[in-house]
Image (cartoon, rainbow, N blue to C red):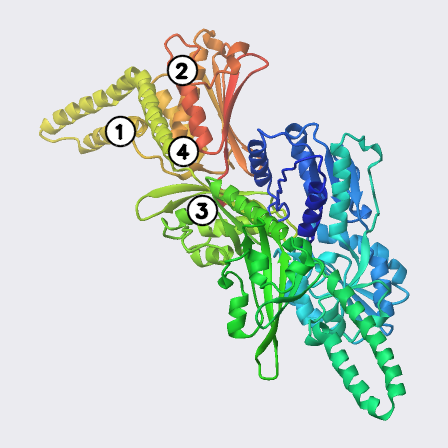
Amino acid sequence: MPGFVSFDAAFRSTLTDSKDYEFEFYVECMDLTRFPDELYHDKLMDLYREKYSGLKIDLIVADLRASLEFLAEYGPESFHNIPIIYYEQDPKLLVDPMPLPVAAVLAGELDMAGTLTLAMRLHPDVRRVFVVTGASRYDQSLEGMARKVFRGFENQVDLQYLSGLPIEELLHRVSTLPEHSLVFYISIFRDGTGRSFKSPDALALISGQANAPIYSVSETYIGSGIVGGSLLSHSAQGARTGRVALRILAGEKPDNMNSLGESGSQYIFDARQLKRWGIREGNLPQGSDVRYRDFSIWDTYRWQAVGIASILIIQTLLVSNFIISLRKRRRAERALRKAADEWRTTFDSIPDLIMVLDNELRIVQVNAATVPFLGFPMDRILGKRYYEAMYAAGAHLDDCPLSRMLETKRHEDAVLYDEKRDAWLFVSADPVLDDKKEITGVVYTVKNVTEYKRAQEAIKASEEFNRAVLASLKNYVAILDKNGTILAVNEAWEKFAHQQSGVTSLAGLGPGVNYLEECRRSIQSPGDFAAQILDGIQSVLDGKGDTFSLEYPCDSPLESRWLLMKAVPFRNPGGGVVISITDISGRKAAELEAQLRREELAHITRIVTVGELATSLAHEINQPLTAILCNAEAAQRFLSRGTPDLDEIQKILDDIIQDDRRAGEVIRRMRALVKKETPRRETVDLNDTVRESIALVRSASSLEGFSLTTELDSELSTVEGDRVQLQQVILNLMLNATAAMRETPPALRKLVIRTAGQGSRAVMVSIRDTGTGIHKKDMDRLFEPFYTTKADGLGMGLSISRTIVSAHGGTIGAENNPEGGATFYFTLPVDRGEQP
């Protein structure tokens, strides 16, 4: 920003003029408005800690509010006991209360009221004033201040505020203002779309379109399109801050150093804008500084022209009346001397170096600033060739733009580095042409731009650092505006984008591309990953959610990957979202491997359960097989008779079929438990699953000596899951219950299996026993792997049961009954097709 450059140059100059110290300056342009993310702030602070860890910092100058708030958040631990000077443009913009102790608080004064009063005096027919501000936090602070100041003018003019508009709309509005209007420019660091600007650049765009004069309150805007006003001088404020810094470095106590409301303002105007809007310089306040006046041959050689004209007049009048001509001659000489004195005063007041050369490039005239720069007295400068005076004898004419000017016969300029003076110089050459367009002289101007050049380099270095911080992030990061258009991506995003293809690819998604539109084009079916990403990011942009997170697969030509996308709001006035994508392929592979191991362990557990029932089940199968054999032998005997009894044979065959089905049902149930299959989701009726489990256990005679009661909810909703796995859970809980009642007297062994709805979204299955109950020390560890209270137990049944129930989206638990025994239960969500 030009304002900061002027402030910094004056501050440095004030300190370096002191002979008591040698200074090293470090400029940090933190760009906190464009990058408000906390991760960026943390990275920035990490850099400062490393960058300044070996340095002794004597003083910190916090320029404006954002830098002070950054120091308040991170500074106390890193810059402890370093005095801080806090500078603000106006007391009304100061942080209140101060977030940390400071050595001194300095503030200028933005003379808004004085500038508007002056503008209304210069334009007495003004009826409307349009106040222009941006959408950034600092723009809004200045706008709030302006509204308070301008309340006193509401009965004089119609005040209208053009604040926070998109730049295109604002340019249209200022180009169609009604007659008798003025524009009062405050600042624009960000427009309504979130686009960032340097405030003078935004002003230049507005000035190019505006159909009314523009006024403002800061010297930094002079030359960018404003007429002028009572402008706050950043150079003066930088020098004032430098003087306070010297007092602090000298050990002076900071108690009385606060200086608020010291305006340092002066009336400054742009001659080009005065001419554009027809404003006479005579109407300006006395002592006004008018800049950017057009340089003309008349201004340079006015005294020669006046002299020649005077001589001709004198010679003409001398013939007719010597006495009259003598009087006129004396009068003309006095006027000439006065004009020459005025010209010389103006010429010498220009701070830049100006040398007037003849057609042989010899110096014929210089201003006062040239003498100390060249280091020669005036009598040794005049008559020298300019390049000998500037660059010493033997220097080449090609080293400066004057050689090009001699060829083109028009203005030429360049920025050159002067090794002799260790300085950067802006050099320009303008020809003085006669009627034949031949060069009769040259106006050679030199401006020292060293401090400006260094400030530009410091700003550029700071911007490069910001880009480096973003590039250092390992995740794939993109920043979107409120419309979904990509503003910036990091290097990791760009590299990953070239490796992808498919629906979820990042290929081709760089700055300027609308990410949301790309998501819409990639949707292949409702609810797919592209649709979920679109809905999630849109919800964050609309403020319906603080964050969005989604895991999804992404295939490239070489491999398949899993990615984790997170989206959080981009905290700036224009809105937006920050997308961070992490490669979680390794974690997903580990989860899949763990899932396969759990399924294998569940299968082994089912086999162990069947092993526990094997002996009783063998007896249960042998009974129908023996009955089949006996019936078959009886049928043979009936058939061996001469006249067999067919009715009797029919009954025997019916008995054989019934016994065969009985044995087949036992085998089917066993086979379903031990068969190794990939889990599959289907609609499951838990009442049927409970009945099948009871039948299997009852067939194995495991319920002999027990009283079994079922309380099954006839209106129980179905669930979605794997039927075999859910049957395994019920069997585990039933067998655990029967084992817990082995020491219970037979008359008291009661097992109650119950199903019931849990509202409209879940169902519950519970197994209640009258056994020994659960010891308090075992309650918290029941479902841990390999933890068991049975001497011959593996400790895997309840652990596997919990894994199965959790995979189905449910919960499992246990509790002691008041009258003795325990109840184990699990809940499952209702099938989504049945949810209201």
**Disc assigned to residue 491:** 3
Q: Secondary structure at mark 2?
A: loop
Which one is closest to the eye, mark 4 or mark 2? 4
**Residue that label 2 marks:** 786
- The residue nearer to you, when weighing 46 against 780, is 46
Tag 1: residue type? Gly
Tag 4: residue type? Arg
Alpha-carbon distance for marks 3 and 4?
Answer: 24 Å
Alpha-carbon distance for marks 2 and 3?
Answer: 48 Å
- Who's the residue at 45% across and 33% down the image? 808
Q: Earlier in the sequence, mark 1 or mark 2?
A: 1
Q: Earlier in the sequence, mark 2 or mark 3?
A: 3
Q: Secondary structure at mark 4?
A: helix
**Residue that label 1 marks:** 664
- Who's the residue at 48% across and 52% down the image? 531
Which one is closest to the eye, mark 1 or mark 2? 2
- Who's the residue at 66% across and 36% down the image? 22
Which one is closest to the eye, mark 3 or mark 4? 3
Tell me if mark 2 has few (under 14), some (14-19) or many (20+) residues whose alpha carbon lies within 10 angstroms of its own.
Answer: some
**Residue that label 4 marks:** 587
